[in-house]
Amino acid sequence: MTFTLNAALRARNFDVSLSLGTAETVAVLGPNGAGKSTLLGITAGLLRPDTGYAELGDATLFDIDGGHFTPPHARGTALLAQEPLLFPHLSVLENVAFGPRAAGISRKEAHQTARHWLGEVDAAELAQRRPGQLSGGQAQRVAVARALATNPELLLLDEPMAALDIHAAPLLRRLLKRVLAGRKALIITHDILDALMLADRVMVIENGHITEHGPTREVLEKPRSRFAAGLSGLNLLTGAITGSGLTTDHGLDIAGHRDDTAHPGNPGVAAFPPSAVSIYPTAEHGSPRNTFKVTITDLEPHGDLIRARAGHLAADITPAASADLGLAPGTDVYFVIKAAAITIYPA
């Protein structure tokens, strides 16, 4: 059973088309305000788009032009939010049994289902506790069990690890990897580790539109959007592929190594790590390299190094080198990169 969505919401500049396979988890990445939560809201039925349709298997979730809109509780979807949102007056067992009971299942069967899923998320011993007696990690595990107890056709996860501490998050991530196997799921995340561990594919949403999608490792190894490049720790320049490299959108000629699929005249990107960037106070550096005059915008610690940012570009240098150059926001310097360190591939 597949999932297909094509929807637009003009007030939020949102226009997205996507599909999920029978048993596929897709991670949705993007900056704040890009439209990730809008996507989940439209899918779950919490937002009504201006146009479009969505189908989950043989069921139509909505068809705006056809005048059809299935209410949230009848969609076969389950939404797991950043906060567990458990009912405080109910026990853990009753929280997990709530969905099956609302669907008309007997109390006995609902409790059996709840106990099964509490066991699946390693929370069986919490059954008689109230939410106020749970840690953040325990509460989120119970929330996972509650979402799965309704046997949803599509699971929607909105940054489920965001509110957890560094000890609870890895446990929940391993749990989700296990329970998502064989299921359809959309997971909103800012954490690259979530995408690597949980997702078969990733989609990058920027300004309400999908700007990049593909197998997780492929997108992270060869990003084509600035956001994905940032997650991968790479600098990214866009432009047109040339015989020697790339001419950027701003007219800079970049020399680099073209991969076999990068054909001159086509749109392309040039990617290189911040560690490959050297910083000079002047353009007189001798050997022919790629040289950009930039203005430092930020300096921040990055492990044992200093990451110097100049707009969308970054360079990693030692603290001693930073001090020698007198780097500070507003300083004009030259970023220099050897051609061998730049990879050029199709956009």
Image: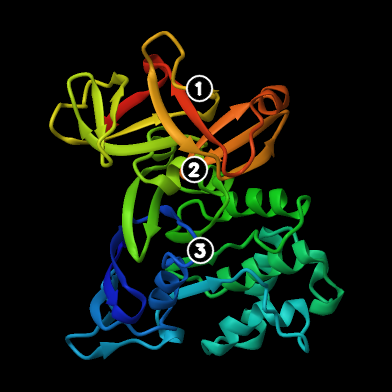
Task: State the image coordinates of residue 320 (x, y, percent, origin top left).
Answer: 72, 23
Q: Is residue 195 above or below residue 324?
A: below
Q: Which residue bears the numbered disc 1?
A: 276
Which of 250/35 is in front? Answer: 250
Marks 3 and 1, the one that precedes in the sequence: 3
Using residue 109 as the reference point, say whether residue 22 is left or right of it: left
Task: Look at mark 2 in the image and give the residue it sits on.
Answer: 230
Q: Residue at x 47, y 48 (%)?
A: 199
Mark 1, other Cα within 10 Å: few <14 / some 14–19 / many ≥20: many
Q: To which quarter of the image does residue 186 belong?
A: bottom left
Viewer-nearest residue: 110 or 56: 56
Residue 295 screen position, x and y as percent: 50, 40
Q: How crowded is mark 2: few (under 14 residues within 10 Å), some or many (20 or more)?
A: some
The amino acid at mark 1 is Ala
**Disc sitting over residue 2 in the figure:** none
Q: Earlier in the sequence, mark 3 or mark 2?
A: 3
Give the vertical position of 314 relative to 283 (above or below): below
Q: In this view, does 244 lie above or below 231?
A: above
Element under disc 1:
helix
Q: Mark 3 points at which residue?
A: 32
Q: Distance between the residues labelled 3 and 2?
A: 14 Å
**What amino acid type is highlighted by mark number 3?**
Asn
Amino acid type indicated by mark 2: Gly
Q: What element carries label 2?
A: helix
Structural distance between the alpha carbons of marks 1 and 2: 15 Å
Whether residues under marks 3 and 2 lie with C-beta atoms below 8 angstroms apart, the answer is no
The quarter of the picture where residue 131 lies is bottom right
